[in-house]
Image (tube, helix red, strand yellow):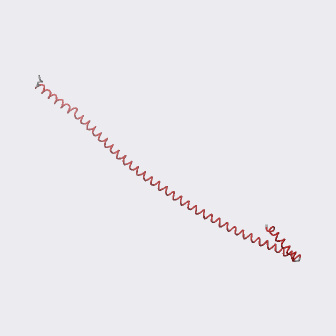
Amino acid sequence: MLVQPDPGLIIWTIITFLILLFILKKAAWKPLLSALQKREETIADSLNRAEQAKLDAEKLLKEHSEKMIQAEAESKKIINEGRQLAERIKENLVTEAKAAAAKIVNDSKIEIEKSRQAALESLKKDISEIALMAASKIIAENLSEKVDKKLVDKMIDNLPNTIN
């Protein structure tokens, strides 16, 4: 036997269903839809904030990368300027050192020449005095040519001792 539909039961089931639907619509449906809508808005807001945070993070990352590139370029520039400055200072120091060395050599040559001239003048003076002494001894003794020659030779032999 198959199930036979009871028309009374079907009517009461439909009426009960409609009453339940009306009660749910009045009491529960609006709060449920409201809660779902709030939940949907919260999720959408969270997604929007997450997307904005992602965009902000990407923007900050891009700015940071650009600043790093600028800092690296600036540091290379500063290093190159430092090297160039060091090279110029080195060249100036070398030039100044060469000039100072040349001046010292030149001053030394001048001083040596002055000392040489002074020594020659002193030597000339000493030789003149020796020649005068020899001449005065020769004249004073008025000796013979042989004795004169001997005396001059003796004076010449003593000449290095007198110069010192």
In this rendering, the count of numbered labels is: 0
Q: Quadrant of residue 102?
A: bottom right
Which image quadrant: the C terminus? bottom right
User: Which one is nearer the viewer's eye here, 124 or 18?
Assistant: 124
Q: Position of residue 111 (x, y in %)?
A: 69, 67
Q: Position of residue 98 (x, y in %)?
A: 60, 63
User: Which one is nearer the viewer's eye here, 47 or 1?
Assistant: 1
Q: Is residue 26 above or below residue 131?
A: above
Q: Please state if 90 lies on the left or on the right of 154 as rendered.
A: left
Q: Position of residue 136 (x, y in %)?
A: 85, 75
Q: Position of residue 127 (x, y in %)?
A: 79, 72
User: Which one is nearer the viewer's eye here, 102 or 68?
Assistant: 102
Q: Is residue 44 above or below residue 71?
A: above
Q: Please state if 133 lies on the left or on the right of 51 as rendered.
A: right
Task: Give the residue at the far front of this rendering.
Answer: 146
Q: Quadrant of residue 119?
A: bottom right
Q: Please state if 74 lies on the left or on the right of 126 as rendered.
A: left
Which image quadrant: the N terminus? top left
Q: Quadrant of residue 42?
A: top left
